[in-house]
Image (spheres, coloured by chain):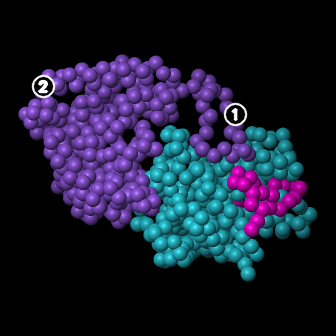
Chain colours: A cyan, B purple
Amino acid sequence: MSVTYIDAIREAQEKLLREDDRVFLYGQDIATFGGAFKATKGLAEKFPNRVFDAPISEDAMIGMAVGAAIEGMRPIIEMQFADFSSVAFNQIVNQAATHFYRTGMPIPLTVRLPSGGTPGSGPFHSQSMEGIYAQYPGLVVLTPATVSDAYHMLLDGVALDDPVIYCEHKFLYRWLKAKSINGDHLPIGQARITRPGKHATVVAYSAMVHEAVRAADRLVQDGWEIEVVDLRSVKPLDIDTILASVARTGRLLAVGEAFPWGGVTAEVVARVTEEGFHLLDAPPQRLNARDTPVPYHPKLWAAHRPTPESICEALRKLLSF
Amino acid sequence: MLRGRILENKLSSLYKAGKIVGGVYLGRGQEAVSATLGTALIQGTDFFAPLIRDQAGRTAFGEPLIDCTRTYLGSVKGPMRGRDGNIHRGRPDLGMPAMISHLGAQVSVVAGMLFAKRLQGTLAGRVGATCIGDGATSTGAFHEGLNLAAIERLPLVVVVANNQFAYSTPNDRQFACADLVEKARGYGVGGFSVDGTDMLACVSVIGEAVRRAREGGGPQMVVARLLRLSGHGEHDDGSYVPAEARVDHYGQDCIEVAMQQLIENHFATAEEIVAWQDQIADEVQRAVAQAQQEPVPDPYQEDWTALSTRFPLDQPISQPIFS
């Protein structure tokens, strides 16, 4: 008996619907159909009038959720793909994210973003938007990498009074399995040492945690012990755990699946350089996707995003200093 | 209507005297439409998302004058505490969300407020309303919001003040249909047209739209024809408005029309109206004076956080404050 990453997301939503009258789900094809990825399968039957098919109106879906949150609800909005949240960008960053600062009233809504690449998905069904949303004040941005985190961080995210951007990785949906949904249940804002090591630190999040662990496994044969830090939430960013890891290893590689200009990896490197320059024995490195749209063909896609091979190569360079 | 006009005249003077930082946006010429809507709504039951030319509607809905003067003058005691200014203010806890500058964005927000009440089982007898201009009907947010409200059959009233200019852009560069009210049919919502310079017509038509929404008739859209009698803001002299537009029927001042209507129908005498004006001028003066005496925000006292949650591990980097 095992539970997948997408099972965890479905289970968390079912628990929320069962235990909290304020929660409702709104998104395209999520009611009878159960969602493009089946993250809401069966929920409309179990919770009639709590799970709604939305028109293809991402802007209005988030605006509606803001209004519902003002009136005491805790909406969970499913974007069919993270990429389509660009249509809702205004309502997310200007309406939801500014509301508490401007008015003193927080907006407890959760936006689920099916994120990241899968083979053959192409430029508009593959994007990683976490860095863009993290740039804006007023949003919490979660990037679970494990089955347990997918479950607990969705529950904990919906419990927050602030708007939450919950980035769930599509590649992990069915590929990632665990024996149980239970885990260490760290609080939001705390990173995890996924794999301890002493020669270099890889800071990663979401699907890249698993690629980083694979790379670290390969480097064992060369005698390198690589520490992998899973950020879990990119905002808030747990700089203390990162700095403590870099203090042990003296070397930093930040890995992300998003585009390379700015973003989460740039923030990690900037913060470590600013606050932990004295801890570094080598120039901190970044590894991201390439600076092109996400390509369609699986061969191009595999070379567009960081892979165990490219992470190993970046680590060897980092360790050569 | 009179409160809105007299307050805004004062705001204009304060702006020109350099006492208000940022912009001042007036509803001059739109008071009949705005105040009529505010009057048709019930504070405490209904929702109202005003836009930039709705001082009259805000006042009619129940917003105290001091909320306006505090926000324009940056008082920390105002609803926005200096964090946002001018017409970007609201009391979301009292059914009046604070607008953002992006036009059309409030349509879906009001729909969501109503949707919440449906889920909570307390929607019956409630209405939500928002105002937009002719320019906002060109936005995707307007389309998405009204379409969503129509699908959900929510008691939403959208009042479009077609004031003929979006900033400087005339109607013929904004939409190609003969009349904006034709759009209502396309969305499957009720559609009304009204002469926005005629207070009694507004009372009748906007009142009917609100009544239909309240009684379960689904979303309603009212298009009010009028002319903006000021620039886009007080920084703008509106010189692009052609002289013909100013002198045609819709160029008439709705306040003057309303005064005539009050007198002709024996609702009030000319003397009573003058007395109202004096009384309102006094109220406005006191609201301005009070806000001017109040403290402005202190950057040293700000907590500089945009989240209500305090994450123990995420201490912001301390930054020196230079002022």
Q: Secondary structure at mark 1?
A: loop
Q: Is residue A237 above or below residue B21?
A: below
Q: Chain of mark 2?
A: B
Q: Is residue B183 magenta?
A: no
Q: Residue at horizontal 61%, vertical 39%?
A: B305
Which picture quadrant has residue A167? bottom right
Q: Name the residue nearer the viewer: A277 or B90.
A: B90
> In this view of the protein, can residue B180 be seen by the observer?
no
Q: Name the residue nearer the viewer: B99 or A68.
A: A68
**Farthest bottom residue?**
A1
**Farthest left residue?**
B264
Q: Residue at horizontal 46%, vertical 55%?
A: A68
Residue B163 - label: none
Percent coordinates x, y for residue B306 in the rendering: 58, 42
- How far apart are the two marked residues, 2 and 1, measured between alpha carbons? 61 Å
Q: Which residue is mark 2?
A: B270
Q: Around disc 1, counting alpha carbons within 10 Å, would you say few (fewer than 14), some (14 to 19), or many (20 or more)? A: few
Percent coordinates x, y for residue B155 in the rendering: 32, 57
Q: Chain of mark 1?
A: B
With B44 as the anchor, is B80 left or right in this view?
Answer: right
Q: Name the residue nearer the viewer: A248 or B26.
A: B26
Tell me which segment is drawn in magenta.
A182-208
- Quadrant showing the N terminus of chain B: top left
Q: Secondary structure at mark 2?
A: helix
> In this view of the protein, can residue B120 be seen by the observer?
yes
Residue B318 - label: 1
Q: Residue at horizontal 22%, vertical 25%?
A: B276
